[in-house]
Image: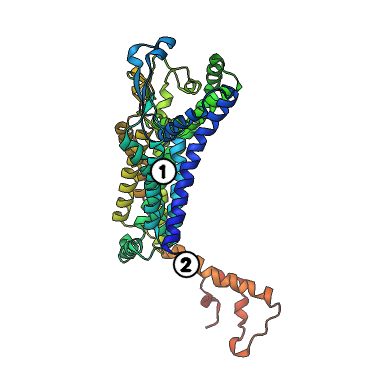
Amino acid sequence: MNRLLVALLAAFDALIAAAVGVGAALAPLTVLWVLGLGGTADWAALWPASVRLWQLGQLVPLQFTLPPEYLTATGLPADAATFTLSLVPLAAAGATALFAARSGARAARSGAWAVGVASGGVVTLAVAWLLWSTSANQVVAVSTAAALLLPVAVFAVPALLGAIIGAWRHGDDGIIDALRIRLEHDPRNREVAEASARGLGVAVLGFVAVGAFLLAVLTILRGGEMVALFESAHVDALGAVIVGLAQLAYLPTLVVWGGAFAAGPGFSIGAGTAVSPSGVELGVLPGIPVLGLVPTAASSWTLLLVLLIVAVGFVAGATARRRLLDGGGERDAVPGAFARAVALAVIVLGGAGAAALLAMLASGSFGPGRLAQTGPSAGPVALAVGAELLVGAAIALFSPVRRGSPGDRAPAAAAAPASTAAAAPRSTPFPIADDAETAPLDPLDLDPLASFGDSDDHRPA
């Protein structure tokens, strides 16, 4: 596939990703405009709101400035007139990232991944500028640099990662192949890169899986609290759908909160609050239904949740070690200490860095006042996850294994010809042997006592 076609396809992917994101925000607002307002308001006012929602989903903080008339009508204090909303609905950013990663992987299979990633990034920048320039708003403002650069990063970074992984798997006749050939020249490091990458992938996915598991358990245990908050809101069917969609957009954010809780540091919902296995300190929470899942007390048993992250580290280390064993050619061989140490470092440092990045994306300001500090803290989460992955992965990578001995493998090798010989009569029921391949039968060969000792003792002198 030529470079021009790759660039066009990547540009089309970027356009589709932006259109889907803006459309996902515009569609429910349009339904609300038709059913809730009866179509009497200006529909054009929905466009800036949709763009702002799309920008929030692309990690762009929104700066709110409420007019005095609104403060008077709602009774809000004057210090709540200006605040920042930066707690990102990670479902929108995750959808863009997945779309971009697929685009980068396809460009890598086409042999021009650099062109595809660059084209997608440039088109995303152009789309971000067009949306920013057509969505001026007096109430909700954004920083120009953030509105232009952050959407590009959300698309370009996953596209680059997908392209590198695709080029490593399928080849690119370029820098990735050169790097792989250089690594494969050294027998000690031949499988280290792939084993480390697999272990890191298991560690990151395991952290997310633990958070999702904990969120599912809390939904079962505290689902009644969430339903009660829904009922106390006194919203109609349309309002319940809008609130449900908004909470669904924040579902990945809550999953990261669950992972941070299981790791130990936990998260906060406002300044001076803490939700962790060691203790829960909460003030007055907003009446958002999904916050009904937040536990109001901690038990000593919740401290055992850290073992889930340790188990994730063990599985990641076992995955890396299995790859090192399979890549060595002999399944009984034990990989070198250097290879296992590199895999351990990648799993621990990479897993801690990924957990810190997820915690940073899942935290921010959710409103005025004390709600300016919401979500997990990246530093403590990284330290806790790194330490727990270190324990589990070190056990899996450096624990001793039973190595096969020649005596253990001899019976298996000897049994192979016998099984082959036993299978021969099935294909040839009456084989005809050549006289040259036979030997005269000795009568003592039929002696049953010969198998219990030296057969020469039973033969005549």
Residue at left offset 35%, top offset 46%: 347
> What distance separates the C-alpha of mark 1 from that of mark 2?
68 Å
- 292 up-or-down from 337: above or below: above
Q: Position of residue 308 (x, y in %)?
A: 43, 35
- 152 up-or-down from 223: above or below: below
Q: Position of residue 125 (x, y in %)?
A: 37, 45
> Helix, strand or loop at disc 2?
helix
* Disc ID at residue 410: 2
Residue most extreme to the bottom: 436
* Mark in front: 1 vs 2: 1
Q: Is residue 109 visible?
A: no
Amino acid type at circle 2 is Ala
Residue at left offset 71%, top offset 77%: 429
Residue at left offset 51%, top offset 70%: 414
* Disc ID at residue 127: 1
* Disc ID at residue 165: none
Viewer-nearest residue: 280 or 292: 292
Q: Is residue 296 visible?
A: yes
Amino acid type at circle 1 is Val
Which badge, 1 or 2, comes first in the chain's sequence? 1
- 124 up-or-down from 106: above or below: above
